[in-house]
Image (tube, rainbow, N blue to C red):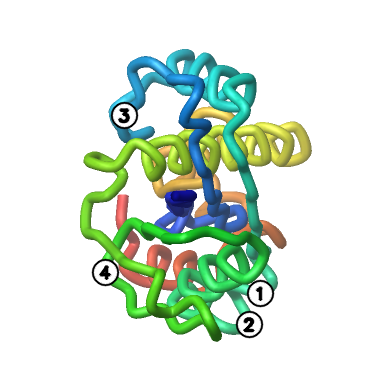
Amino acid sequence: MKIFGLDEVGRGALAGPLVASAVALNSKSQVPKLQDSKKLSAKEREKLYKLIIKSGAEIKTEIISVRQINNRGIGWANKEIFIRLIKQIHADKYIVDGNMRLKVRGKTDRTKSVINADATRKCVMAASIIAKVTRDRLMAELHREFPIYGWKDNSGYGTKKHIEAIQSAGAVKHHRDVYVTTVLKNNQL
């Protein structure tokens, strides 16, 4: 039975894309010490990322751009990213981290959302690691172009330094309009 675990990263960030991954682990190759990506250091995530890839796991990653998030909203993006992934892969079962009701033609009955699946299901843990490392690498690339925001360290999330940089230098095309407007309006430091 092929089971894909799906998880996303970056939903609450002020900048950068939304990234989600789907992973079906190779039953013949174990990946040791899998856990929720949020509980791992960057070094541990990188090591596990490489082990997951070397293990022969099936992996698919999808990205929703900031432009799409700004145009259609994060709620749409969060559902859409999982729907896109599920449409691209074949499995007997899809386990999605969260509590969304996803409808995908011909696959809805095999799709199940599970709250905290990224802490309880190995395939979802692997998906969270792949998505997190992928997004962190993207944010490190964007940091080279816009170092003032500290994206290599905060991955686009609303740290004090990031918010102060937005207040002093303004937002750029990689920022999410609604989030940045809300933060500046509330002057949340």
Contact check, label 2 and label 1, Cβ < 8 Å: yes
Q: CA distance from mark 2 to mark 1?
A: 5 Å
Lower position in the chain sequence, tag 2 or tag 4: 2
Image mark for residue 68: 1
Q: Determine whether the residue tagged by mark 1 lies in a helix, strand or loop.
A: helix
Q: CA distance from mark 3 to mark 1?
A: 30 Å
Amino acid residing under circle 1: Gln
- Indicate the position of residue 67 as horizontal and vertical percent values: 69, 71
Amino acid residing under circle 2: Asn
Q: CA distance from mark 2 to mark 4?
A: 24 Å
Lower position in the chain sequence, tag 3 or tag 1: 3
- Indicate the position of residue 71 as horizontal and vertical percent values: 63, 82
- Residue 79 vs residue 170, the one in the foreground: 79
Rendered view: 45 above or below 112: above
Tag 4 residue: 99
- Indicate the position of residue 157 as horizontal and vertical percent values: 44, 47
